[in-house]
Image (cartoon, rainbow, N blue to C red):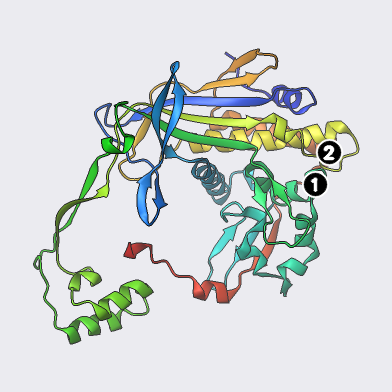
Amino acid sequence: MSSITLDHLLAACRPGGASVLTSVTPLEPAAGPHASVAPAKFTERGNSVFAYERRFWEGKAVDAVLIDSKQSQNNRLEAAVSAAITDGDEVLSAMPRIELRFEDGQAYSDIDLPHRAFDGQIRAGTINGEPATASPDYRALRDATVSHARALIERSPMTLLLGGWDASRKSNQGRYRSILVGEIIGILADQDGDPASHQSKRGGARIDPLGMQINLADKDRKAIAEAQKSELSKGTYENAMKKKQASTLGLGGIPPALEQLGGVTCQAIIRSHVLSFAALRALRFDCESPEGDVACRAVLAALALNGLARSDSELLLRANCDLVESGPARVTLDKRYGEKESLAPLTILEAQALLSAALDYARERAGLVWDGSVLMVEGNPAVLNAAVDDAQDE
């Protein structure tokens, strides 16, 4: 079985080419089929819940649980690409990007920020001393369109690949759908009754070697909280000042209790990705010939496959959700009219070679500029100083 080549990508990126490329991988709990897995949690009316859905599997409708969402899968791809750039990867380091830097040394790129090129952190910053939104370099990105996307592919290609929406702009909002989508679902082992009735509870406990109870006087508890005030979240500090329990400051033990969501048992776990060539073909890049547009689309497709090869090799989801591949990925290229071509999954090295070849072709046919340049944005210190993370108080 052959692997996907640049010729495959170019053919798919031309009018009338393949609609999609799919990759479907069977997974299983690392500890074995007896082990439960912790799906993604969502908030519903103030409570943490799992997302259950009806899916079609092996010829029938079944109850399934969402283990990793589309957004999360895309974030994992971004993290893998960002890590490769940090490590000095020769091919990915050529990708142009936006970088947000704060005075304290913190730095984030458009690959890391949730809204990519149109993120509010970027819009709140400055470029060469003027508001980012007034900078010609940044305005060119906001003024780009699906039919004139050259500025974005040469500054923030991840926005084109994974999607972006310039939602706060009063007019001419840029909207780019995700070219790549993916998810991990689990088919519940028990298909009888309410799916939520089959989820386990997780026990929580904490042992303090000094004692299960630490009975501090009010003045002592408040003094400890005051001494740590600059490092405590607002919620923790206020609770410590009002409540008498030392546990608000992490002191003393917590008896075992079955209160938190645990996991579910699955008879099958499936990871799937869909790369849409139909969506890629909607993009145009102000090239002198149609083949230049084809070449630029192929670069985005190769970037997607490169990121997938990296992110799929790192099955790092969350605690109590360690998974392994139970079989090879089934990669399928749509050939139109019901015909399909099976391809071998790409290794990271093969994906590197494919992206490198796509870049060479686009530089020649479209004059594409990927030179590793960075549009530097100075982060707004007011935003940084106002940032609070109260997640620890939940």
| Of 192 and 36, the residue lying toward us | 192
- When asked about the image quadrant of residue 132, the answer is bottom right
| Of 315 and 160, the residue lying toward us | 160
Q: Measured along the vertical axis of the image, is residue 138 above or below residue 160?
A: below
Q: Which residue is drawn at 80% across and 39% down?
A: 363
Residue highlighted by disc 2: 366
| Of 280 and 381, the residue lying toward us | 280
The percent position of residue 390, horizontal first and vertical second, equals 39, 66
Q: Which residue is drawn at 34% across and 37% down?
A: 322
Decide which of tag 2 and tag 1 comes sooner along the chain: 1
The disc labelled 1 sits on which kind of residue? Arg
- When asked about the image quadrant of residue 346, the answer is top right
Number of the front mark, 2 or 1: 1
Q: Measured along the vertical axis of the image, is residue 83 above or below residue 299?
A: below
| Of 172 and 91, the residue lying toward us | 172
Q: Is residue 344 left or right of residue 235?
A: right
Q: Measured along the vertical axis of the image, is residue 169 above or below residue 350?
A: below
Q: How far apart are marks 2 and 1 (CA)?
A: 10 Å
Q: Which quadrant holds the N terminus?
A: top right
- Residue at the far right in the pictured view: 288
The local secondary structure at tag 2 comes to helix
Residue highlighted by disc 1: 150
